[in-house]
């Protein structure tokens, strides 16, 4: 056991390279012998200029330099070493009582100094201290990196095995420069995943530009992407840079890529293949360096088959596919997500201790969430706002989550004030009648003995989705 420890230490010491710059031959040889004896690799130079040259050619972990040297003095050596390799430790040797220069050297970034004459063991102690300090610094950097990495995922909640695998995949794909294609139903967290990929990538400090291909009309989408020159089309009063230019050296996220019009798909493919494009109405060829991430709720393969999506573009962008599963397939995540959103919305509405009763959590976990995480988030937001008290009971949950079996026998929350209980009850009754009448408002109003106008007003007040056409004959 002990042997192993010694061997490991020796191996580590062997890797450490030290440059000794000292003009006095006896001192130079003395130091170099001591270092070699302790298992370090030592090289020597007898003047400042030679020392700097040697350092420029080779990398050293530590430089031990005298301050008074022919050629360049110790301070010049120190400055050159630090500007070339800030991580290299510099230990300066000062003539006895020349503390002033030693202080100057420390200010310039020397790790420590020793005064002549010195015992070689003293130098070994300083070297050992530096190596330990460097080890700790490295550990610190690694720790910080790990914390940063975890923070990127902090906003994506998931303990289910499938989400854990996705976190790992995201961490791996983030480090590459390849295209990532994120699939998933609406509300599964595709945009969050895209953010995480960018934030964990080497391009994290460069721009992250998003474009939603479904939300912008075709003609606008093109100028949004490529930018335009003044006068390129009516209304183009100035030159405008597009998203490609804005994303240069960073990442561009094409949300809902499945909705990109065919004609633009061809143009996008050209940019991906050549890295070149022109602004609309311009003839200057611009070159961009971008990493691309895509998301879609559609099955792109089916879209290719249906002729809505170019096959060549599909192969070009479907390099690293990541599929986010619907929430109903990872129910283990529901309690954690619910708590996460309760914390957010609870704090927002001044109820930082908001919790869910076990029965309500059971209902939340049993529901199938066609709108996925977004639906859960909105449900919690709504109950956090509506529910008085600090505990969310099942009866506070939206009827679809509470369960269809209990639709007409509302459990009125004991914790709610009268007006709110009445309101909930009224909502339940109306919902039930609408279900019975297949959503026919005229019939529902008749059953409820109210006018259609009153029903329309109540529906709006109680947050039902309505449009005025619902009340046309
Ligand atoms: N795992 C998760 N942890 C925490 N919040 C999440 C998670 N997944 C989704 N959300 C939240 O749910 C909402 C929807 O997520 P997001 O916009 O990323 O989904 P999407 O898949 O892009 O949906 P769409 O296809 O409708 O655009 C966001 O408010 C997001 O913050
Ligand atoms: Mg989205």
Image (cartoon, helix red, strand yellow):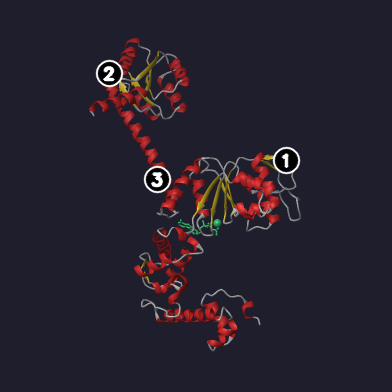
Whole-percent x and y of residue 20? Answer: 37, 18
- Viewer-nearest residue: 455 or 240: 455
| Crowd around label 2: few <14 · some 14–19 · many ≥20 (10 Å) | some
Whole-percent x and y of residue 84? Answer: 47, 26
Residue topped by disc 2: 120
Q: CA distance from mark 1 to mark 3?
A: 44 Å
Is mark 2 in CB contact (under 8 Å) with mark 1?
Answer: no
Residue that appears at 26% across and 20% down: 121
- Mark 1 residue's CB less than 8 Å from ligand 2: no
The local secondary structure at tag 1 comes to loop
Residue situated furthest front in the rendering? 305
Whether 96 is drawn above or below 349: the answer is above
Residue 284 numbered mark, or none: 1
Q: Quadrant of residue 136?
A: top left
| Crowd around label 1: few <14 · some 14–19 · many ≥20 (10 Å) | few
Left or right relative to 468: residue 90: left
The mark that comes first in sequence, 2 or 1, is 2
The local secondary structure at tag 2 comes to helix
Whether 440 is drawn above or below 215: the answer is below
Residue situated furthest bottom in the rendering? 449
Q: CA distance from mark 2 to mark 1?
A: 67 Å
The local secondary structure at tag 3 comes to helix
Residue 147 numbered mark, or none: 3
Select label 2 or label 1 by which is in front. Answer: 1
Q: Is residue 127 at least partly visible in the picture?
A: yes
The mark that comes first in sequence, 2 or 3, is 2
- Viewer-nearest residue: 323 or 104: 323
Q: Quadrant of residue 138?
A: top left
């Amino acid at each position: 056991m002990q042997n192993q420890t010694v061997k490991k230490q020796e191996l580590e010491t062997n890797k450490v390279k030290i440059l000794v710059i000292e003009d006095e031959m006896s001192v130079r040889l003395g130091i170099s012998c001591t270092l070699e004896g302790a298992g370090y690799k030592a090289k020597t130079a007898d003047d400042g200029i030679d020392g700097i040259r040697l350092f420029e050619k080779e990398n050293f972990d530590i430089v031990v330099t005298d301050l008074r040297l022919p050629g360049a003095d110790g301070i010049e050596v120190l400055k050159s070493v630090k500007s070339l390799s800030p991580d290299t430790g510099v230990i300066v040797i000062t003539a006895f009582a020349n503390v002033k220069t030693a202080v100057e050297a420390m200010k310039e970034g020397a790790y420590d100094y020793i005064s002549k004459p010195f015992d070689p063991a003293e130098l070994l102690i300083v070297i050992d201290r530096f190596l330990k300090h460097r080890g700790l610094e490295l550990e610190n950097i690694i720790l910080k990196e790990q914390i940063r990495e975890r923070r990127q995922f902090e906003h994506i909640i998931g303990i289910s095995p499938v989400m854990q695998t996705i976190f790992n995949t995201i961490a791996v794909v983030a480090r590459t420069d390849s295209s990532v294609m994120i699939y998933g139903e609406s509300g599964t967290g595709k945009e969050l995943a895209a953010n995480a990929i960018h934030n964990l990538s080497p391009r994290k400090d460069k721009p992250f530009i998003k474009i939603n291909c479904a939300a912008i009309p075709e003609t606008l989408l093109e100028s949004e992407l490529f930018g335009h020159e003044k006068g390129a089309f009516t209304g183009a009063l100035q030159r405008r840079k597009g998203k490609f230019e804005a994303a240069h050296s960073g990442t561009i996220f094409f949300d809902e890529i499945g909705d990109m019009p065919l004609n633009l798909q061809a143009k996008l493919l050209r940019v991906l293949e050549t890295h070149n494009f022109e602004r609309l109405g311009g003839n200057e060829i611009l070159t961009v360096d971008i990493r691309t991430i895509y998301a879609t709720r559609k099955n792109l393969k089916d879209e290719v088959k249906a002729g809505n999506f170019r096959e060549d573009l599909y192969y070009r962008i479907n390099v690293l596919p990541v599929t986010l599963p619907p929430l109903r397939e990872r129910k283990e995540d529901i309690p954690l997500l619910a708590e996460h959103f309760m914390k957010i919305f609870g704090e927002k509405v001044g109820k930082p201790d908001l919790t869910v009763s076990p029965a309500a959590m059971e209902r939340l976990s049993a529901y199938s969430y066609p709108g996925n995480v977004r639906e859960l988030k909105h449900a919690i937001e709504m109950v956090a706002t509506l529910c008085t008290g600090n505990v969310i009971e099942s009866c506070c949950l939206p009827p679809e989550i509470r369960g269809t079996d209990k639709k007409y026998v509302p459990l009125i929350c004991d914790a709610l004030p009268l007006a709110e209980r009445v309101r909930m009850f009224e909502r339940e009754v109306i919902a039930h009648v609408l279900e019975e009448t297949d959503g026919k408002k005229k019939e529902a109003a008749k059953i409820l003995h109210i006018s259609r106008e009153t029903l329309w007003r109540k529906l709006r007040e109680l947050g039902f989705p309505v449009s005025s056409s619902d009340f046309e004959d």
